[in-house]
Amino acid sequence: MDMMENLTGIYCICMEDVKSRLSVVKTVAGGQLSTGSELFDYEFVSVQIRKSLELVAFASMTANKNLYAEAHAGFANHWKAKDMLNNLKRLHPGFYPQPIRLDHVKESGDKHFEHVEDGYLTQDDFVTLYDLCSEVLHTWNPFTKKERHIDFKRSVAEWVQRIDRLLRLHLMRFVDREEIWVVDMEYSEDGKVHAFTAGALQQAI
């Protein structure tokens, strides 16, 4: 296995982890799984969503071990998503996935992709959702006058839908190489995550 195959493999493992966690969240949001307490369900969901967002952020550093180590170590000092994203941008300005969709297949067999313009989890959404999940994880102070209430601003199902739209088919760029990966979260042949170099899919964006 050459180095690039190993790197794409690591990236795909991260994305499979995201898929697994969001699948559990969907099950809870759909009422098929519950702790027996709505409050505990929200807390459980918050953990899975927050870990999923961290995976999305850090996975973009997998092509460079040194950057990944720095990004991951720096996270301990950034309890707010905005600070974490600013740190990631400093290391790698193009770290955030770029959602795309298959527009059409040409007669030659070349696939043409278009950028997804809306409905996905933007970086501003990322900050909002991450911070909301982080607040839920703190133990409630029984002496506070604030109600023990969880407001996710949007439904959990909508947040997951936005993450899905961000990742379903996306581009990933790296700080230390011009190569672009096209990542398919459910490749038609086996339903698993696959990452291809742009040329391998004959894409034009």
Image (cartoon, rainbow, N blue to C red):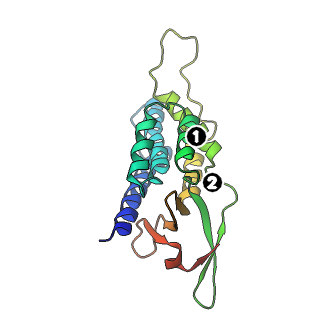
- Residue type of the residue flagged with mark 2: Tyr
Q: Quadrant of the N terminus?
A: bottom left
Q: Position of residue 205 (x, y in %)?
A: 65, 72
Quick one: 31 or 174, which is closer to the camera? Answer: 174
Return the mark for residue 120: 2
Q: Is residue 81 depicted above or below 66 in this figure?
A: above
Q: Position of residue 143 (x, y in %)?
A: 50, 8
| Front of the two marks 1 and 2 | 1
Quick one: 118 or 35, which is closer to the camera? Answer: 118
Q: Which residue is mark 1?
A: 86
* Residue projecting furthest to the left: 1
Q: Residues within 10 Å of mark 1 (few under 14, many from 20)?
A: few
- Judge from the rendering whether residue 14 lies leftward or rightward of residue 152; answer left or right: left
Q: Residue at x 54, y 49 (%)?
A: 160
**Is residue 118 visible from the viewing direction of this image?**
yes
Q: Residues within 10 Å of mark 2 (few under 14, many from 20)?
A: many
* Residue projecting furthest to the right: 117
Q: Residue at x 47, y 64 (%)?
A: 185
